[in-house]
């Protein structure tokens, strides 16, 4: 049986997308998405999960660059992708494991001004 690894999230960017170029010239964007939980804690406050995401340009699209251009801190976006785990050795030689969502597609779910209003607490 084949495995299923599909993620759909709707949340707000916690900060602007960090865009960088790899050594091979490929553009990649990283960001954290704050996704509200449906339940509240015992004090009545809404809780959120903070999900690390990565989006890459491809031969036929500039997804990373487009997201970095059109979305900003506070923007409400929807993403579809898959969970991936990778690892690397840090500068001290210690193995570090990273779990993140590799974004295949995204949708901007509000006007840019609405994100500004949300960021300034005017929602």
Image (cartoon, rainbow, N blue to C red):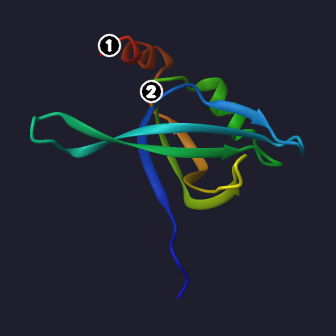
Q: Which mark is residue 39?
A: none
- Give how far across and how far down residue 66 sits, in percent: 68, 32
- What residue appears at the point 51 percent right and 38 percent down from the top-left corner? 32
Q: Nearer the viewer, residue 15 or 118?
A: 15
Mark 2 in CB contact with mark 1 (< 8 angstroms): no
Residue at the extreme bottom: 1
Q: Is residue 38 left or right of residue 33?
A: left
Badge 1 element: loop
- Give how far across and how far down residue 82 sits, in percent: 55, 59
Q: Is residue 38 left or right of residue 17?
A: left
Q: Is residue 9 left or right of residue 72?
A: left
**Is disc 2 surrounded by few (<14), some (14 to 19) or many (20+) residues within 10 Å?**
few
- What residue appears at the point 61 percent right and 30 percent down from the top-left corner? 17
- Give how far across and how far down residue 78 sits, in percent: 47, 42
Disc 2 target residue: 110
Quadrant the C terminus occupies: top left
**Is disc 1 surrounded by few (<14), some (14 to 19) or many (20+) residues within 10 Å?**
few
Q: Is residue 73 left or right of residue 62?
A: left
Badge 2 element: loop
- Give how far across and how far down residue 40 sits, in percent: 16, 41
Q: Is residue 38 above or below residue 46?
A: below
Q: Nearer the viewer, residue 87 or 112?
A: 87
The label nearer to you, 2 versus 1, is: 1
Quadrant assignment, res 88: bottom right
Q: Nearer the viewer, residue 38 or 52?
A: 52
Disc 1 target residue: 121
- What residue appears at the point 78 percent right and 48 percent down from the top-left corner? 58
Q: Nearer the viewer, residue 120 or 91?
A: 91
Residue at the extreme right: 24
């Amino acid at each position: 049986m084949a495995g299923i690894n599909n993620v759909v999230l709707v949340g707000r960017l916690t900060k602007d997308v960090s865009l960088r170029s790899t050594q091979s010239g490929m553009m990649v964007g990283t960001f954290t998405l704050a996704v509200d939980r449906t339940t509240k804690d015992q004090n009545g406050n809404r809780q959120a999960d903070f999900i690390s995401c990565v989006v890459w340009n491809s031969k036929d699209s500039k997804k990373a660059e487009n997201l970095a251009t059109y979305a900003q801190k506070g923007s409400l976006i929807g993403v579809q992708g898959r969970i991936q785990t990778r690892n690397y050795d840090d500068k001290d030689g210690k193995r570090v494991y990273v779990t993140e969502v590799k974004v295949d597609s995204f949708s901007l779910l509000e006007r840019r001004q609405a994100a500004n209003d949300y960021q300034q607490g005017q929602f």
